[in-house]
Amino acid sequence: MSTITLKSIPDFLHVELKKRAEMNKRSLNNEILICLESFLGYRNVDSNQYLEEVRTFRKLIKTKITQEMIDEMKSVGRE
């Protein structure tokens, strides 16, 4: 596996990457790899991890989302 050293990372970018890493319980290095893979379209999705992320996100939503709400949101701007 290769190694890359990043230099002159803007402070705001470093802070945001660290926040994302902490939020996703990853090291800074792993978060950067995930971001690069996602950006390039190479992210191998672990279905169990993905389901856990979805479940965590659903807990953050305070109201129940119905199919009608989804259909309405999808149609916004299409008319």
Image (cartoon, rainbow, N blue to C red):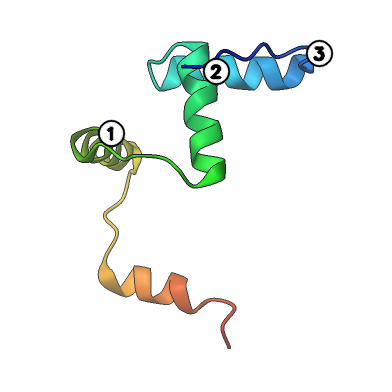
Label drawn at residue 19: 2
Q: How many marks?
A: 3
Identify which residue is drawn at 55% across, 33% down: 36
Q: Marks 1 and 3: which is nearer the front? A: 3
Q: Amino acid at mark 3?
A: Ser
Q: Disc 1 vs disc 3: Cβ atoms closer than 8 Å?
A: no
Front residue of 71 and 28? 28
**9, above or below 62, in the image:** above
Q: Tell me the distance, in whole angstroms, between the alpha carbons under discs 3 and 2.
A: 19 Å
Q: Residue lying farthest front? A: 1
The residue carrying pointer 1 sits among few (fewer than 14), some (14 to 19) or many (20 or more) residues within 10 Å by Cα, namely: few
Q: Which residue is mark 3?
A: 8
Q: Amino acid at mark 1?
A: Thr
Residue 75, x across and y down, in percent: 48, 79
Disc 2 secondary structure class: helix
Identify which residue is drawn at 66% across, 15% down: 15
In the picture, residue 79 is in which quadrant? bottom right
Q: Which residue is mark 1?
A: 56
Q: Marks 3 and 2: which is nearer the front? A: 3
Q: Tell me the distance, in whole angstroms, between the alpha carbons under discs 1 and 3.
A: 34 Å
The residue carrying pointer 3 sits among few (fewer than 14), some (14 to 19) or many (20 or more) residues within 10 Å by Cα, namely: few
Q: Tell me the distance, in whole angstroms, between the alpha carbons under discs 1 and 2.
A: 17 Å
**72, above or below 57, in the image:** below
Residue 32, x across and y down, in percent: 55, 23
Residue 17, x across and y down, in percent: 59, 20
**25, above or below 60, in the image:** above
